[in-house]
Protein backbone atom coordinates (compact mmCIF):
# COMPACT_ATOMS: atom_id res chain seq x y z
CA UNK A 1 0.00 0.00 0.00
CA UNK A 2 1.23 3.50 -0.85
CA UNK A 3 0.78 5.91 2.02
CA UNK A 4 1.79 9.49 2.80
CA UNK A 5 2.59 10.00 6.46
CA UNK A 6 2.62 13.16 8.52
CA UNK A 7 5.69 14.25 10.45
CA UNK A 8 4.06 13.22 13.73
CA UNK A 9 3.64 9.66 12.45
CA UNK A 10 7.32 9.52 11.48
CA UNK A 11 8.25 10.71 14.96
CA UNK A 12 6.07 8.09 16.66
CA UNK A 13 7.53 5.40 14.40
CA UNK A 14 11.09 6.54 15.12
CA UNK A 15 10.30 6.53 18.85
CA UNK A 16 9.48 2.82 18.60
CA UNK A 17 5.68 2.68 18.25
CA UNK A 18 5.13 -1.04 17.57
CA UNK A 19 1.60 -0.56 16.24
CA UNK A 20 2.90 1.87 13.62
CA UNK A 21 5.84 -0.38 12.79
CA UNK A 22 3.50 -3.22 11.87
CA UNK A 23 1.17 -0.88 9.97
CA UNK A 24 4.00 0.61 7.91
CA UNK A 25 5.85 -2.67 7.44
CA UNK A 26 4.20 -3.61 4.14
CA UNK A 27 3.65 -0.05 2.91
CA UNK A 28 5.52 2.20 0.52
CA UNK A 29 5.94 5.21 2.78
CA UNK A 30 5.87 8.65 1.18
CA UNK A 31 6.89 11.90 2.85
CA UNK A 32 6.34 15.46 1.80
CA UNK A 33 9.57 17.42 1.50
CA UNK A 34 8.12 19.47 4.39
CA UNK A 35 8.25 16.43 6.69
CA UNK A 36 11.77 15.66 5.49
CA UNK A 37 12.83 19.20 6.43
CA UNK A 38 11.04 19.06 9.77
CA UNK A 39 12.58 15.73 10.71
CA UNK A 40 16.13 16.62 9.72
CA UNK A 41 16.14 20.11 11.21
CA UNK A 42 15.36 19.29 14.84
CA UNK A 43 17.90 21.10 17.01
CA UNK A 44 20.36 19.20 19.16
CA UNK A 45 20.15 15.86 17.35
CA UNK A 46 23.03 13.62 18.29
CA UNK A 47 24.84 11.58 15.63
CA UNK A 48 22.83 8.42 16.30
CA UNK A 49 19.48 10.25 16.13
CA UNK A 50 20.46 12.04 12.94
CA UNK A 51 21.62 8.76 11.40
CA UNK A 52 18.37 7.01 12.37
CA UNK A 53 16.28 9.82 10.89
CA UNK A 54 18.41 9.96 7.74
CA UNK A 55 18.09 6.19 7.24
CA UNK A 56 14.31 6.43 7.68
CA UNK A 57 13.99 9.34 5.24
CA UNK A 58 16.20 7.51 2.73
CA UNK A 59 13.77 4.57 2.84
CA UNK A 60 10.81 6.84 2.02
CA UNK A 61 9.65 8.30 -1.27
CA UNK A 62 10.12 12.06 -0.92
CA UNK A 63 7.63 14.22 -2.82
CA UNK A 64 8.82 17.71 -3.72
CA UNK A 65 6.57 20.65 -4.44
CA UNK A 66 5.15 21.14 -7.92
CA UNK A 67 2.46 23.33 -9.51
CA UNK A 68 -0.39 20.93 -8.65
CA UNK A 69 0.63 20.88 -5.00
CA UNK A 70 0.96 24.69 -4.96
CA UNK A 71 -2.55 25.16 -6.36
CA UNK A 72 -4.01 22.61 -3.95
CA UNK A 73 -2.19 24.27 -1.03
CA UNK A 74 -3.84 27.58 -1.89
CA UNK A 75 -7.26 25.93 -2.03
CA UNK A 76 -6.71 24.25 1.33
CA UNK A 77 -5.48 27.45 2.98
CA UNK A 78 -8.54 29.31 1.72
CA UNK A 79 -10.99 26.67 2.91
CA UNK A 80 -9.49 24.89 5.92
CA UNK A 81 -7.25 27.53 7.52
CA UNK A 82 -4.29 25.22 8.07
CA UNK A 83 -0.77 26.49 8.62
CA UNK A 84 1.26 26.58 5.40
CA UNK A 85 3.41 23.48 6.17
CA UNK A 86 0.33 21.39 7.03
CA UNK A 87 -1.52 22.67 3.98
CA UNK A 88 1.42 21.66 1.76
CA UNK A 89 1.48 18.17 3.29
CA UNK A 90 -2.28 17.73 2.82
CA UNK A 91 -2.05 19.11 -0.72
CA UNK A 92 0.67 16.58 -1.45
CA UNK A 93 -1.58 13.70 -0.39
CA UNK A 94 -4.49 15.00 -2.47
CA UNK A 95 -2.40 15.84 -5.54
CA UNK A 96 -0.61 12.49 -5.49
CA UNK A 97 -3.85 10.62 -4.65
CA UNK A 98 -2.29 9.01 -1.60
CA UNK A 99 -4.04 8.01 1.61
CA UNK A 100 -2.72 10.16 4.44
CA UNK A 101 -1.93 9.02 7.98
CA UNK A 102 -1.75 11.64 10.74
CA UNK A 103 -2.46 12.09 14.43
CA UNK A 104 -3.39 15.74 13.84
CA UNK A 105 -7.15 16.27 13.98
CA UNK A 106 -6.87 19.60 12.10
CA UNK A 107 -6.63 17.63 8.86
CA UNK A 108 -10.25 16.52 9.29
CA UNK A 109 -11.23 19.96 7.92
CA UNK A 110 -9.59 19.30 4.55
CA UNK A 111 -12.09 18.43 1.85
CA UNK A 112 -10.92 15.69 -0.51
CA UNK A 113 -8.23 14.33 1.82
CA UNK A 114 -8.28 10.55 2.28
CA UNK A 115 -7.32 10.76 5.96
CA UNK A 116 -6.56 7.93 8.32
CA UNK A 117 -6.47 9.31 11.85
CA UNK A 118 -3.97 7.73 14.20
CA UNK A 119 -4.45 7.69 17.94
CA UNK A 120 -1.88 6.62 20.49
Image: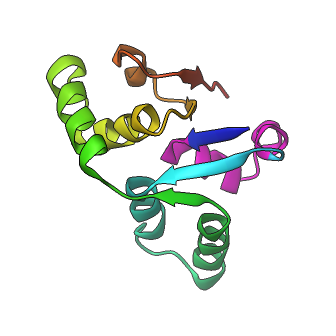
From the viewer's side, name the closer residue of 31 and 64: 64
Report the span colored magenta: 5-24
Place of residue 19 in the rendered image (x, y in percent of width and height, measured from the top left): 81, 36
Q: Is residue 65 left or right of residue 62?
A: left
> Relative to 92, is 111 above or below?
above
Q: Is residue 2 left or right of residue 102?
A: right
| Residue 71 drawn in magenta | no
How many numbered marks are there?
0
Which residue is outermost to the front?
67
Which residue is located at x 21 percent, y 37 percent?
Answer: 71
> Relative to 20, is 39 above or below?
below
Image quarter (top left, top right, bottom left or bottom right) of the N terminus = top right
Which residue is outermost to the bottom?
47
Image quarter (top left, top right, bottom left or bottom right) of the C terminus = top right
Q: Write down the quadrant of residue 95 in the picture.
A: top left
Which residue is located at x 66 percent, y 80 percent?
Answer: 48
| Residue 21 drawn in magenta | yes
Which residue is located at x 45 percent, y 21 percent?
Answer: 105
Q: Main secondary structure of the magenta part?
A: helix
From the viewer's side, name the closer residue of 10 and 5: 5
Place of residue 72 in the rendered image (x, y in percent of width and height, measured from the top left): 26, 33
Place of residue 84 in the rendered image (x, y in percent of width and height, measured from the top left): 23, 41
> Relative to 110, is 102 above or below?
below
Q: Write down the quadrant of residue 91 in the picture.
A: top left
> Relative to 33, is 113 above or below?
above
Q: Write down the quadrant of residue 87 in the picture.
A: top left
Q: Is residue 47 left or right of residue 108?
A: right
Place of residue 36 in the rendered image (x, y in percent of width and height, measured from the top left): 46, 61
Which residue is located at x 63 percent, y 39 percent?
Answer: 3
Q: How is the image coloured?
A: rainbow
Q: Is residue 88 left or right of residue 63?
A: left
Amino acid sequence: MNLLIDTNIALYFLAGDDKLASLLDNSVVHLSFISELELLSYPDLNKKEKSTITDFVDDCVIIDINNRIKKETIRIRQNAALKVPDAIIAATAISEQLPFLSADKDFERVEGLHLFSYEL
